[in-house]
Amino acid sequence: MPTSAPPANRFERRRAATRQALIRAARQILAESGDTGVSIQSIADRADVGFGSFYNHFESKTALFDEAVTDALDEYGRTIDERLDGVDDPAERIAFGIRLSAAMADTHPEIMRILRHRGLDHVRSERGLAPRALGDLRTGAASGRFTFEDPEIALSALGGSLLALLDLRLGRPHRDSEEAARAMAELMLRMLGVPADEARGIAHRPLPDRG
C-alpha cells in the first residue's frame, strides 16, 4: 500500500483514508469479477463512504479502476523486489520472478486475480513487474546471457506467458503449481537463449529466502 509520508492534518488524513477506501473497494471488485460496470453507488457502499465523496477523488469509474490496477501493480513490484534483493544474475531474476508470481496466487490472491482480469493491458506498464523484467532482459542481453534481439518483444512474450501461467494456476488450483512454475521458468529461459541444461538447473534452484 502507499509508502508516502502520512497526511499532516486531520482533514488530509480523512481525505486520504476515503481515497484509499475507494481504491480498496475497486481492487476487491476487480479481483472478484473484473466487472467495471458496477455502479458508483455500489463502489461507495462497499468502501463505506458517501456517494458524493467519489467525485472528490476520481473523475470517473475508469480513473478509479485504473488507479486500483496501478495500486496493485505497485504492491506486486515491491513484493517481488523484497524477495529478489541481492539476486544479480538476470536469468535467476527472471526465473525466480516467474515462480514467485505463481506462488503469490496463494499469498497475495487479490493482486494475482486483478492481473488475471486486467494484466494483458499492462504487460508493458511502467509499474509493477514489467519495468523490472525489462531491465533484467536488457542487462542479460548486454552481457550475452540472453540472445534475443528486441527486448520489448521478449517482454511481451514473457508477460503473456506469465499471465497464461497465472490463469492456469487460478483456474486449476489442484494442479502442482510449483512444478508448473518451474516448467514455465525453464521454458522462458530457453526462449531467451539460456542453454537447456542450465535453464533447467536455474529453474529448479531454491527460491531466495524471505527477508
Image (cartoon, rainbow, N blue to C red):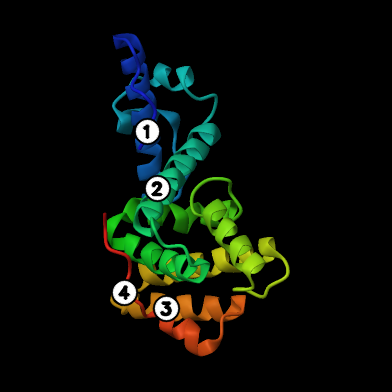
Kind of residue indicated by mark 1: Thr
Q: Quadrant of the N terminus?
A: top left
Q: Decide which of tag 1 and tag 3 comes sooner along the chain.
A: 1
Q: Position of residue 57 (x, y in %)?
A: 46, 21
Q: Which residue is mark 4?
A: 206
Disc number at residue 203? Answer: 3
For this view, does 125 lie left or right of residue 85? right
Looking at the image, which is closer to me, 72 or 99?
A: 99
Q: CA distance from mark 1 to mark 2?
A: 10 Å
Kind of residue indicated by mark 3: Ala
Tell me, yes or no, if residue 167 can be seen here. no
Q: CA distance from mark 2 to mark 4?
A: 20 Å
For this view, does 17 lie left or right of residue 93? left
The residue at 58%/52% (across/down) is 121
Q: CA distance from mark 2 to mark 3?
A: 22 Å
Disc number at residue 78? Answer: 2
Q: CA distance from mark 1 to mark 3?
A: 32 Å
Kind of residue indicated by mark 4: Pro
Could you tell me which secondary element the residue under label 2 belongs to?
A: helix
| Pointer 1 with pointer 3, Cβ within 8 A | no
Looking at the image, which is closer to me, 7 or 72?
A: 7
The residue at 46%/59% (across/down) is 116
Q: Which residue is mark 1?
A: 3
Q: Position of residue 139 (x, y in %)?
A: 60, 62
Q: Residue furthest bottom?
A: 197
